[in-house]
Amino acid sequence: MKTRLKAALAVVALAASTLASAQNSLLNASYDVAREFYKDYNAAFAAHYKKTAGVDVKIDQAHGGSSAQARAVADGLDADVVTMNTSTDIDFLADRGVVAKDWNKRFPDNAAPTTSTMLFLTRNGNPKNIKDWDDLVKPGVQVVVVNPKTGGNGRYAYLGAWGYVKKKGGTDAQAAEFLTKLYKNVPVLASGGRAATTTFLQRNIGDVLITFESEVVSINKEFGEGKVDAVHPSISVVAENPVAVVERTVAKKGTAKLAKAYLDYLYSDEAQEIAAKHALRPRSQAVLKRHADVFKPIQLFTVQEMFGGLGEAQKVHFNDGGQFDKIYTVGK
């Protein structure tokens, strides 16, 4: 009997230990080009949580094209939080009951602690003399870009180009014509931001890469300074980086408190400084001012003002049979 009791107690202790371990670990499902930022942020958060809550936490990351990540979570990936680059990917999860319907009201600034914008990376010395969006549609210029059906990086590149034409007084028809020319210059659509960078720098395809401003820092770290020149176009789009707790997972694992603390801390001065170092535009105006050398002034427009929000843009441009499908078919 004693042996059986000991064995039973051992099983209970193991189960309790496993549960405690699960409650002190998080999985963050995130978009491709945020991996370096979250590597640094996770270390800072773990130190902060240990100091304030007295608990050691383990944070794992899963990265890929943002839409592919959202689908993985919807299909059962047990992420505790999602940190994306488009709100439509989190709306997709909200529609499936995986995150809260009002997720964008659970944290400040539309639940987007940082923003970014789209710029161009050229090969060192900018041999094709790329200065603005118009240069991307010239004959003989090869453009590397993410597929807007699989990644927010690609959607913002598309919306940035469309908005550029409209901001300069063009019509929707002229914008569609401009985008058709642009995608004719795209040799291959990448699945996500990191895949696009690999295509550009490792496979040596293309003259210019359209990507998030934050990718410049990652490239310089990974591939060495001087491989690319960053070109800031005259006009570009504000890209919000929204976050949400995955209610389905935290209810199962008991990690709701930890998941909320993890996302709350993204708004702290320390996290905003880390974001700035990774060329993510901080929401904190004080931190933004301190890094004015990194964040060049660009005429920025929001998706809301130009397209009525990302949800509307999704329906018109990126859903099957939408404007992108028409443009890309014509372009090819």
Image (cartoon, helix red, strand yellow):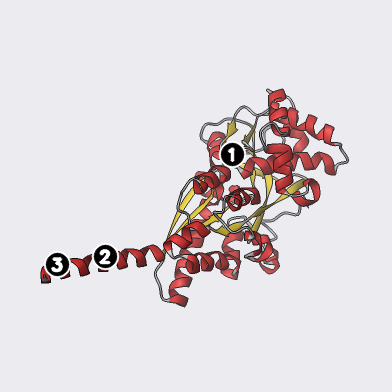
Q: Which badge, 3 or 2, comes first in the chain's sequence? A: 3
The residue beneath circle 3 is 4
* Residue density around tag 2, few if under 14, some if 14–19, many if 20 or more, within 10 Å: few
Residue contact between numbered discs 3 and 1, judged by CB atoms under 8 Å: no
Q: Is residue 65 above or below residue 81?
A: above
The N terminus - image quarter: bottom left
Residue named by callout 2: 14
Residue 299 in view, yes or no:
no
Could you tell me residue 313's position as x and y percent? 73, 43
Q: Considering only order in the chain, which callout, 1 or 3, is on the residue closer to the N terminus?
A: 3
Residue at the spot x=43%, y=73% of the render?
A: 50
Position of the C terminus by quadrant = top right
Q: Amino acid at mark 3?
A: Arg
Kindly identify the residue that appears in the image at 11 percent across and 68 percent down.
3
Spatial separation of the CA atoms under disc 3 and disc 2: 15 Å
Callout 3 environment at 10 Å: few (<14), some (14 to 19), or many (20+)?
A: few
Where does label 1 land, which residue?
150
Q: Is residue 155 left or right of residue 265?
A: right
SS at badge 1: loop
Q: Amino acid at mark 1?
A: Thr
**Residue 58 versus residue 258: which sits nearer the camera?**
258
Mark 1 neighbour density, 10 Å: few (under 14) some (14–19) many (20 or more): many
